[in-house]
Amino acid sequence: MLQKKLPSQDVFDPTLTRLDERPADTAERLNRALEPEAVIEVAGLPVGRAVDVFDQPFLTRGARLLRAIPAEQARAILDGMAVDRQADVFRQAEKADRDALFPLLDDDVARIVRTLLAYPRDSAGSLMTTEFVSVQATATVAEVLDHIRAVHHTRETIYPIYVINPSSGRLEQTVSLRRLITASPGDPILTHCSGRAPITTTASADREDVARLIAHYDLLAVPVVDDARCVLGIVTVDDVLDAVVAESTEDVQRFGGVAGAEGPYLEIGFGRMLSKRAGWLCALFLSEMLTASAMQHFETELEKAVVLTLFIPLIMSSGGNSGSQATSLLIRALALGQLRLRDWWRVAIRELPVGMTLGAILGAIGVLRIAVWQQLGIYDYGVHWPLIALTVGAGLIGIVTFGSMAGSMLPFILKRLGFDPASASAPFVATLVDVTGLVIYFRVALVILHGTLL
């Protein structure tokens, strides 16, 4: 039978045979397709292939697609999925879809899914799977390998094996499948363990902390244990990678002044789009009103020296930009664990000279610009143009220094108060520095121009 030629990736045609297509590519096409077309393709997929597609973490509308196909087909797909992906589908679903799909799960599976859903969204508990390989500490290598052969099709990963104390149920050791393959079948399993205490995490641990743990120790998975060190589940490296991508997306959105919005851009409804953006815009607009209040406070000075208003956009943008630079560097450093709260003073000592130097560079450029414009006759700043240039240069030093300090300290303050440092969005920092920058600028002008223009 001849294979039909595949059309462009942007064209969706559920009638085409795509049995050789990778599940990830199918999931991506389903995300781009209109929902009725996606339902038709899902309904026509063999169950095994549909399971592979629904196991893709970036598949959207999973619950809606399952609800739209025959119940028995949806039940078969859910039964074949990994339990952590089942939990992801239910977590992203609307209440009506969850209520309709839960009866399709076996009672034991439904109980596990509800347990996973009870953990906070950003925690290790929400990422973990209960499908892992565990053996008793009294087993031999041959017994462990036989056990792996028997259960491998129901486990998310078989490469790390967790050795459990048979009497207490505590996690004793971990051993890799690679090591067991090269071992003698009759050897006790414990003779091939490292002897060091296993690296573990707790269900309440933040997913970013779990990601750092896996990266630092180069793990394929990390076990999640309770207070008695009994294994609740494992978080695999691929689950962490998906979580880190999602976390990075949220951080970028927050840094741009948008509340974290889940899902692809085109999947976000009009109402949700407004709710994610309107709040921040209103808060920033109200904050910017302080800028108008600051300018009103210096109304007399502005009337006497209107020329000062020419440099207000320059002054405000420079301070905001320096603050945004510092904030972005510090947020990333905190996220990667390169800095701790107690390091704030080291950052302050570092940012102070950096801010002053950057301000001096910009100040020198500002002074040079005024001098060139004056000498070439492009614009006449008046007889006191050297003092105006000095005001702009000194103001830039003060404002850029303040912007660097404020931008670097704000993430520490937010983290200390229990907020995500990424909430220190660039617009928020810029607004803060705008108001303060105006005050600094006009105070410098009062000192330098006193007795001349002011």
Image (cartoon, rainbow, N blue to C red):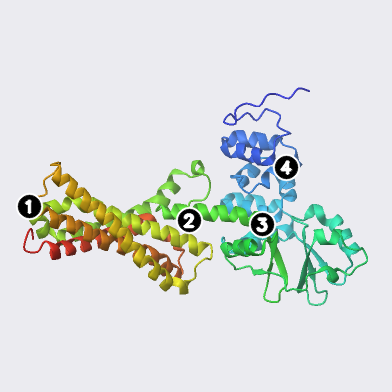
Q: Nearer the viewer, residue 118 or 433?
A: 433
Which residue is identified by label 4? 73
Whether 408 is drawn above or below 383: the answer is: below
Calculate the distance from the C-alpha at mark 3 to the C-alpha at mark 1: 68 Å
Of mark 4 and mark 3, the one earlier in the sequence is 4
Image coordinates for residue 245, horizontal then vertical, percent: 56, 52
> Which quadrant of the figure has residue 302?
bottom left
Tell me whether the residue at label 2 lies in contact with that at label 1, contact meaning CB atoms closer than 8 angstroms: no
Calculate the distance from the C-alpha at mark 4 to the C-alpha at mark 3: 30 Å
Q: Is residue 332 left or right of residue 93?
A: left
Of mark 4 and mark 1, the one earlier in the sequence is 4
Res. 344 visible in picture: yes
Q: Is residue 115 left or right of residue 186?
A: left
Which residue is identified by label 3? 237
Of mark 4 and mark 2, the one earlier in the sequence is 4
Calculate the distance from the C-alpha at mark 4 to the C-alpha at mark 1: 85 Å
Q: Is residue 81 left or right of residue 454?
A: right
Calculate the distance from the C-alpha at mark 4 to the C-alpha at mark 2: 38 Å
- Sort mark 2 into few (<14), some (14-19) or many (20+) by Cα contacts within 10 Å: many
